[in-house]
Amino acid sequence: MESKNNDRAIFVLFLTVFIDLLGFGIILPILPLYAEQFGAKPNEATLLVAIYSLMQFLFAPLWGSFSDACGGLRQRYGRRPILLLTLLGSVIAYIGLGFANSLWILFIARSLAGIMAGNIATAQAYIADITTPTNRARGMGIIAAAFGLGFIFGPAIGGLLIGTDPINLSIARRILYRFSNHPTLQN
């Protein structure tokens, strides 16, 4: 039987994965239009979207291995330090995205966000650590649900932020562009 602490940990892992995918999804419909404001050509905007997934693909195994390699630390704190580090990195990446004043800073911010989103492998490993073999499928299913829900609600929220006129990005312009130093975004 699993303890209340494990249920709480599974809930925190659910939120971690949900927030990761929600952030990815919110930015997805906005990013090409945002990049266009910095003079990005369509192929550059496409690369800007793809760089996140490429970095996540490359760094997920590294985060997983790193969380495995921290043996003594993992015995004492679990995989939490890696998860907290990657969440902090995601926050920094999204702040960088919001304050970007050039296309190359957008690429750096998206790359960092993708690198930090590699924590999903760590979340899955954490689930495997804290669940019994009989409850492991349930724990993995909860992580899969967080992934799916984040990917459903993120683009929907992003689409709502864009509004009905993508050229005049209504709410998204006010939220994402408000503090930008790029002169074309200062409207």
Image (cartoon, rainbow, N blue to C red):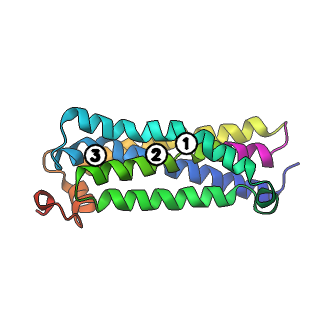
Question: Is residue 157 at all visible to an observer of this figure?
Answer: no
Residue type at mark 1?
Phe
Residue type at mark 2?
Gly
Position in image of residue 144 (x %, y %): 61, 37
Q: Callout 1: few (<14), some (14-19), or many (20+) C-alpha neighbours within 10 Å?
A: some
At 25% from the left and 55% from the top, the residue drawn is 172
Position in image of residue 53 (x %, y %): 45, 37
In front of the other: label 2 or label 1?
1
Q: Is residue 81 magenta?
A: no
Residue type at mark 3?
Ile
* Quadrant of the drawing holding the C terminus: bottom left
**Region in magenta:** 124-133
At 77% from the left and 60% from the top, the residue drawn is 73
At 13% from the left and 50% from the top, the residue drawn is 168
Position in image of residue 124 (x %, y %): 68, 42
Position in image of residue 128 (x %, y %): 76, 42
Q: Which residue is mark 3?
A: 30
- Residue in the foreground of this view, choosing between 141 and 57: 57
In front of the other: label 2 or label 3?
2
Circle 3 SS class: helix
| Label located before the other in sequence (2 or 3) | 3
Q: Is residue 129 magenta?
A: yes
Horizontal side, residue 97 vs residue 14: left or right: left
- Residue in the foreground of this view, choosing between 115 and 141: 115
Q: Callout 3: few (<14), some (14-19), or many (20+) C-alpha neighbours within 10 Å?
A: many
Q: Residue furthest right?
A: 1
